[in-house]
Image (cartoon, rainbow, N blue to C red):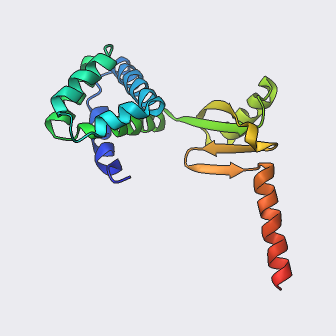
Amino acid sequence: MINTRAANRYAKAFLSITKSEDDLMIMFKDMSSVKKAFEQSQELKLFIDSKVIKDTDKVETLKKVFPDLSVYSTNLLDHIMNSGRIDLFDDVAKCFVELYNEKMGNQNVILISASKLSHDILTEIKSKVKSLTSKTVYLTNKVDKNLIGGFILKVGDKQYDASFKQQLKNLEHEFFNISIH
């Protein structure tokens, strides 16, 4: 993503203005809410990226969409708009959440499986990831009926694919290599 570096700079600057743990938590809640809204609404992303809509109108609309933003986040929104980079607001929120999690030693983990897994299995997986990363693990189990079996584990920017589909691809690749030799 082209704007990631600029968004990361804004997020770092936003993180640096934190005066207390309470302020940091408020800012994290704000940015988590913004991040989630943009992930769930393609229309919101298209709106913020529009070249036809004036930046001032975008900010006013965003303030209505997010009426509970703290003074810090509202000031950030105004600053980004005044810099002509309002289209980065969602990326700044994503970067801030990542920086916050890194600072606090948190690790978000996504486990994709064919069906909902039991609490015991999820606890065991969470424990294994915690021992590997030495971080506080927040595990989300997503169900993908297309998997048939196995699972996909996403830890940060790494992915471990132990799905049946991937295992079949690996087997096919091995057979193909054997038949060539």
Determine the residue positioned at 77% across, 52% down: 165
The C terminus, quarter of image: bottom right
Give the left or right position of residue 133, taking residue 92 as reference: right
Determine the residue positioned at 75% across, 28% down: 123
Image location of residue 60, percent across then percent down: 21, 22
Residue 89 visible at all? no
- Residue that extends furthest to the top in the rendered view of this protein: 68
Q: Nearer the viewer, residue 108 or 50?
A: 50
| Location of residue 44 with respect to 146 vertically, above or below | above
Image location of residue 57, percent across then percent down: 19, 27
- Residue that extends furthest to the left in the rendered view of this protein: 82
Q: Nearer the viewer, residue 84 or 51?
A: 51
Determine the residue positioned at 75% across, 30% down: 122
Residue 52: quadrant of the picture: top left
Image location of residue 44, percent across then percent down: 37, 31
Image location of residue 64, percent across then percent down: 28, 17
Determine the residue positioned at 71% across, 51% down: 161
Give the left or right position of residue 37, taking residue 50 as reference: right
Residue 54: quadrant of the picture: top left
